[in-house]
Image (cartoon, helix red, strand yellow):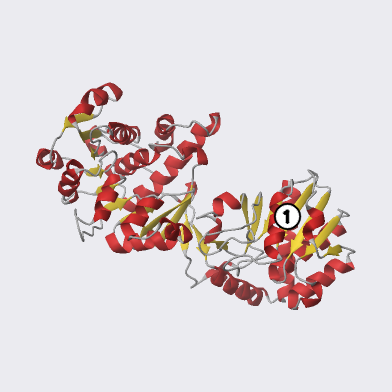
Amino acid sequence: MDTPQPLYSAESVRELDSRTIAALKIPSIALMKRAGRAAFNQLLRRWPDVRRIQVFCGGGNNGGDGYVIAALAAQKQIPVTVCACVDPQKLKGDALEACHYARREGVQIVTSPTALDDADGDTVLVDALLGTGFRGELREPMDHAVGCINRAPAPVLAVDIPSGLSADTGAAAEVVRADATVTFIGRKLGLYCGRGPALCGEVIFEDLGAPAEVHNGLAPLAKRFTETSIKRLPPRAADSYKNQFGRVLVVGGDSGFGGAALMASESAARSGAGLISLATHPQHLPAALTRCPEVMAHPVISGQELEPLLEGPDVIAVGPGLGRAPWGEQLLARAGRAETPLVLDADALNILAGGRVLAGLRRDDWVLTPHVGEAARLLDWDSAEVLADPRAAATAVQQKFSGVVVLKGAGTLIAHDGGVDLINSGNPGMASGGMGDLLTGVIAALIGQHLSPLEAARLAVWLHGEAGNRAAEDGQRGLLATDLLPHIRRLVD
């Protein structure tokens, strides 16, 4: 397996820059020129037919990268204009030297972005306004420049990070919407979580020749797992039998909410669990037998009736369609005390957040899978606070309840005792009902097949998202949760 990718804070990346300059024994302007050339090469790779380049430059090192890009474009005899949002006479250090480099190559520099609103389809815009040190809200002239970039009918390449995006959290208000982002030295967490995935386009990493040892002793904010760095299930032996692959119990489906529990059960079955039982409201039994007769459905009207079913399973998934009425509270209260690994989702989390059921309970062997709203309720935060710093929110939920916490999103964060993992998988078509129920079933099935709760969470998030990507090949709009099931089955093997 490949090593997961470290995701750093802006402060840590500045330290990486300094270490790289020292390790390579080069002046800082040389590293800036490497960054500019790497970004320019990626621009040509992605848009080989570009006929004009317009570079928006700020006053710091990010702006300096932009001036280098402009100089290289001029060398290639590609018409290029720099819109300087900071007076070039006020530049200092490497940014000033990069500006001189651009002037020597004959680059035209203007100080107003208003003339650039008419960029056509042959033009590529380069965002080199603000780097990883940006904090707070955009002010003039940067907010005007960002508006010009976003209004222009031309593709955008962001240098290191889209201007206005927080490198540490992925939070953003007014921000450049890029088609591609070339980032340097160290990957920034904000590119991959929060609003980052919606704003960065394709993220291209360039290490600029930094030696591996510059990362030593520098703790990342998170680690990004990809398909090749996630532990998979081993092949099955020829003499395998069902009891070797986990007995999963799904608890949920109050009156009128049976579909969620049925989907969780079926996704557990399609993910390879050996035996699946479903404890649900009696009215859902006919639907369960019709939808998936392989699931052993049991009618349950109280926590007391659930008790005998808690003795057999290897893992219990509670929450899909559970509701918040006394029926759901009773079932969660009984299941939550079972000496069996748990996966909690949906209304199980909402009940837990209420504080009346399982109050103060901390378990090392459970997986909590909140979306933003559920995480906010578990923490008694506003949803806006979770969105402003999803890593902090995932960590706070894990510290409060222990175990493994899966904060779902475009960049799903998995918090655990050892830190925070991130997995980018899936697509906007998955913003529809039932997707979380499927994920719950997949996690439970993988725990039943002898993965640890953390290993199961990692693999399940990737499987779920990749299945969504394959299902969306026919279109994202109208994508249903159950469309993922055949793809989950193929991917899990």
- 64 sits to left or right of 101: left
* Image label count: 1
- 140 sits to left or right of 103: left
Q: Is residue 438 above or below residue 282?
A: below
Which residue lies at the image location 77% right of the left edge and 77% below the top edge? 90
Q: Image quarter for residue 62?
A: bottom right
Q: Quadrant of the C terminus?
A: top left
Between residues 486 and 373, which one lies in front from this camera angle?
373
Q: Is residue 281 above or below residue 325?
A: above
Q: Let me know if residue 293 appears in the view.
A: no
Which residue lies at the image location 30% right of the left edge and 51% below the top edge? 367
Horizontal and vertical percent position of residue 231: 40, 48
Which residue corresponds to mark 1? 148
Between residues 321 and 213, which one lies in front from this camera angle?
321
- 134 sits to left or right of 482: right
Horizontal and vertical percent position of residue 277: 21, 34
Question: Which three-letter amino acid code belongs to the residue tagged 1?
Answer: Cys
Horizontal and vertical percent position of residue 243: 21, 36
Rate crowding at label 1 as few (under 14), some (14 to 19) or many (20 or more) other CA atoms within 10 Å.
many
Which residue lies at the image location 23% right of the left edge and 36% below the top edge? 254
Horizontal and vertical percent position of residue 228: 49, 48
Q: Let me know if residue 25 appears in the view.
A: yes
Which residue lies at the image location 16% right of the left edge and 51% below the top edge? 337
Task: Give the structural element (helix, strand or loop) at label 1.
Answer: helix
